[in-house]
Image (cartoon, coloured by chain):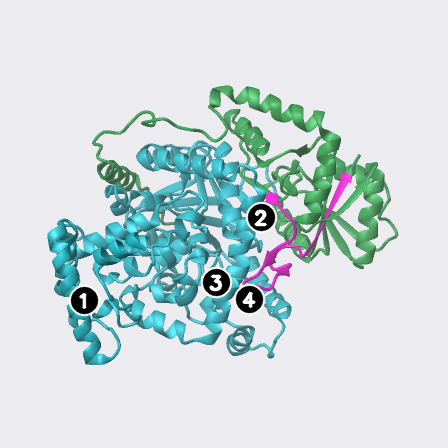
């Protein structure tokens, strides 16, 4: 297999051209001039993280109320339920209304709790968990292909979230083991289950917590901020939902 | 994309005569423009955000070598590859070499104006690789063999009937008049492509230096598909898209999205930091970032135009501009239309071929007012006009009519001395009466006709000085 060019010379020349354009001849080891960071310097990050976590827990009820409103504005069907069990009942209701034959779901704890026991047994709806068999390389690639086909043909995708954002009516999913990029994307309907304490006031708290993750070296490859259904207005400005992603999205607020 | 910036006059004339384009352009104002005003109005500290966004972008641009180096190091740390491309050809060469070495036959693409700038689709096709645009607007534009009309809504010049005809002709569908049905059809067609593609190519809205993260802002979900489904993901980005840390994203996402579509947040914001990790369930095995100069260092090197690199590509200045709203995107003849395009295009394609663009503005300031990072576009347009009248040093341009240059030089000389101005006013009134007698309508003759061919010159009944004296007495 022919390798792509390594590109070290290109990098050096490229950066030198920028330096020349800026009237400098030597590389700098730190940025020149005042950097006005949007949120504050990195050495005060710990304090901002503490504030963000304090807000998420301290104002949990008010933030759930705010998310209920902003979620509806941004196009989610919002449902509030007192417990994971009732969230499961709601999921089943939606699946029945859709006449779903199969649903894929992530393995977030809240999803396991909601889809408890034999909730779906006897309903004729197949539940497909996001699980990859890593026993061997062959098993892994076969298992990935099967999972992908299942996600592509599912009528419904069910996930938990890592965070939600009250400011914008947003669910945040950071894929990891048991949590896929595609469950919330390929099926025509997505249901997100959100627990008390997961709601952040604004985008700023989210990115503060993400910066903490990066500084700590806990880097995952992907993050999606999902704010309502997939939509377009590319033909005559007419709003159409469900272009490539789900056209119908539900946010279930638990507790 | 082949620059057609020379044809601004023809392009704008044909847009002005096209009723459908005029109707669709009106929609920009009632749609995006009004939505931007409500969304920015609903953001309590909007003016503060603009100012801070501007400061951060300036800081990055003035330290671009530092931040790009940091970015590249961190993308590599996350398992990605970085390629620095000095021009469109080098960038396309790299994409093609990766595609060929992986045996890729088809690529799915999410919207990237840089890809248009590079002519990447034409290049891929010439290599026998099928490029598929997956943003609905870009898909329509690609099927039609057309070019984007607006950076946010590329196919907004087309009517539903035209899209229907296009789908019938190119996809063999029945005639579909309903916009929802047309969208469903595109979903069906493109879903197959997402499942089969060997490579995904995306643009980038922001590159986060500290974490090596590419950020994409989309609404349809095609950006998520392109970055998740194929085995290889290549992100291509202009070198100016860097922000220092992920904590800056809250600010910049608000500025970009609320200025572009007036949404509080787009349906999807996606961040990509390297390829899929082994413990993750899906995502590409390879991630590449191609950082492209392609003339941007020319903007960087000119301190009068450097500010153009602050642009977030939101399109707000297009929607606000009284000229864009009449002549539309195609008249500008290249990838970036509107007020910001009138600065960027001449610098990337050459001022001599784009000499009408700096004049395609009334200098009303609506663009600067709308810009989320307060880019002083009128100042830069004036600077380019000045360069055009001098024509000799930068950018070594000889194409401006020398008589117009002479006239402008004459004007500069005349305003600098009261005596000459008095004389010029007198000559002006005399000149105008001659013109009026000749043609009945006051158009300037010969080399100055460019100023009056498309508008009537108001009659100067008296000189400024005598009018001023009279008004003071009244």
In the rendering, what colour is chain A?
Answer: green
Question: For the residues carrying marks 1 and 4, which lies nearer the camera in this image?
Answer: 1
Q: Chain of mark 2?
A: B
Quarter of image, res B361: bottom left
Q: Nearer the viewer, residue B85 or B410?
A: B410
Direction from residue A155 to residue B46 in the image, left or right: left
Q: Which residue is mark 3?
A: B138
Residue A148's tag is none
B51 left or right of B461? Answer: right
Between the C-alphas of marks 2 and 3, the distance is 18 Å
Q: Nearer the viewer, mark 1 or mark 2?
A: 1
Q: Which residue is mark 1?
A: B429
Placement of the C terminus of chain B among the 4 image quadrants: bottom left
Report the number of discs.
4
Q: Element under label 2?
A: strand
Task: Residue B156: tell me if it is visible.
Answer: no
Relative depth, front residue between A149 and B400: B400
User: In the rendered structure, the residue with mark 4 lies on which chain?
Assistant: A
Q: CA distance from mark 1 to mark 3?
A: 53 Å
Q: CA distance from mark 1 to mark 2?
A: 61 Å
| Callout 1 touching callout 2 (CB < 8 Å) | no
Gap in angstroms between the C-alphas marked 4 and 3: 11 Å
Which tag, 2 or 3, sits closer to the chain's start? 3
Q: Which stretch is magenta?
A: A225-253
Q: Position of residue B122 (x, y in %)?
A: 36, 64
Circle 1 residues within 10 Å: few <14, some 14–19, many ≥20: some
CB-based contact (under 8 Å), mark 4 and mark 3: no
Does B109 sit left or right of A243 as displayed? left
């Amino acid at each position: 297999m022919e390798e792509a060019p390594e590109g070290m010379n290109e990098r050096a020349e490229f950066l030198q051209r920028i330096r020349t354009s800026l009237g400098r001849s030597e590389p700098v080891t730190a940025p020149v001039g005042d950097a006005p960071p949007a949120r504050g310097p990195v050495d005060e990050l710990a304090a901002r993280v503490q504030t963000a976590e304090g807000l998420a827990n301290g104002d949990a009820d008010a933030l759930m109320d705010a998310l209920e409103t902003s979620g509806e504005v941004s196009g989610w069907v919002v449902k509030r339920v007192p417990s994971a069990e009732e969230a499961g009942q709601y999921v089943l209701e939606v699946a029945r209304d859709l006449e779903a034959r199969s649903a894929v779901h992530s393995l977030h704890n809240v999803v396991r709790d909601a889809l408890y026991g034999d909730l779906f047994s006897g309903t004729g709806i197949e539940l497909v968990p996001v699980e990859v068999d890593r026993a061997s390389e062959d098993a892994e690639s076969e298992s990935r292909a099967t999972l992908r086909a299942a996600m592509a043909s599912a009528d419904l995708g069910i996930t938990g979230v890592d965070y939600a954002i009250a400011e914008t009516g947003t669910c945040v999913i950071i894929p990891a083991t048991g949590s896929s990029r595609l469950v919330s994307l390929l099926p025509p309907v997505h249901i997100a289950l959100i627990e008390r304490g997961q709601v952040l006031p604004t985008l700023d708290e989210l990115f503060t917590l993400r910066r903490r993750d990066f500084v700590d070296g806990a880097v995952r490859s992907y993050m999606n901020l999902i704010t309502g259904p997939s939509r377009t207005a590319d033909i005559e400005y007419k709003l159409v939902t469900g272009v490539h992603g789900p056209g119908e999205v539900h946010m279930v607020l638990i507790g | 994309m082949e620059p057609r910036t020379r044809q601004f006059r023809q392009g704008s004339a044909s847009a002005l005569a096209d009723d459908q384009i005029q109707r669709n352009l009106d929609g920009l104002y009632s749609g995006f423009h009004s939505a931007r005003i409500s969304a920015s109005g609903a953001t309590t500290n909007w003016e503060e955000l603009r100012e801070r966004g501007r400061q951060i972008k300036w800081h990055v641009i003035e330290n671009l070598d530092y931040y790009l180096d940091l970015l590249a190091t961190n993308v590599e740390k996350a398992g990605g590859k970085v390629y620095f491309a000095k021009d469109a050809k080098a960038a396309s060469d790299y994409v093609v070499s990766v595609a060929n070495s992986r045996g890729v036959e088809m690529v799915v693409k999410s919207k990237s104006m840089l890809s248009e700038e590079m002519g990447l689709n034409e290049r891929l096709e010439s290599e026998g690789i099928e490029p598929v645009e997956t943003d609905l607007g870009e898909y329509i534009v690609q099927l039609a063999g057309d070019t984007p009309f607006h950076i946010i809504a590329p196919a907004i010049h087309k009517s539903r009937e035209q899209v229907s005809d296009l789908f019938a002709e190119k996809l063999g569908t029945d005639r579909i008049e309903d916009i929802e049905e047309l969208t469903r059809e595109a979903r069906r067609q493109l879903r197959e492509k997402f499942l089969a593609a060997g490579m995904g190519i995306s643009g980038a809205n922001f590159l986060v230096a500290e974490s090596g993260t590419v950020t994409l802002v989309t609404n349809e979900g095609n950006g998520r598909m392109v970055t998740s489904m194929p085995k290889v993901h290549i992100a291509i980005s202009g070198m100016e898209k860097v922000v220092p840390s992920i904590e800056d994203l809250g600010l910049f996402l608000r500025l970009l999205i609320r200025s572009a579509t007036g949404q509080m947040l787009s349906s999807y914001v996606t961040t990509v930091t390297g390829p899929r990790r082994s413990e993750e369930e899906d995502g590409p095995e390879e991630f590449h970032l191609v950082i492209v100069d392609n003339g941007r260092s020319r903007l960087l090197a000119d301190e009068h135009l450097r500010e153009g690199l602050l642009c977030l590509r939101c399109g707000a200045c297009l929607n606000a501009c009284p000229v864009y709203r009449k002549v539309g995107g195609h008249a500008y003849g290249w990838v970036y239309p509107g007020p910001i395009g009138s600065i960027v295009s001449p610098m990337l394609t050459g001022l001599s071929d784009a000499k009408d663009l700096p004049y395609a503005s009334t200098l009303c300031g609506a663009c600067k007012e709308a810009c989320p990072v307060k880019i002083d576009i009128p100042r830069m347009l004036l600077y380019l006009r000045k360069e055009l009248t001098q024509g000799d040093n930068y950018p070594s341009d000889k194409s401006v009519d020398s008589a117009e240059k002479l006239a402008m030089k004459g004007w500069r000389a005349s305003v600098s001395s009261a005596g000459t101005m008095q004389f010029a006013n007198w000559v002006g009134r005399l000149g105008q009466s001659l013109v009026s007698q000749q043609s009945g309508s006051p158009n300037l003759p010969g080399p100055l006709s460019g100023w009056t061919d498309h508008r009537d010159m108001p009659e100067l009944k008296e000189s400024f000085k005598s009018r001023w004296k009279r008004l003071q007495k009244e």
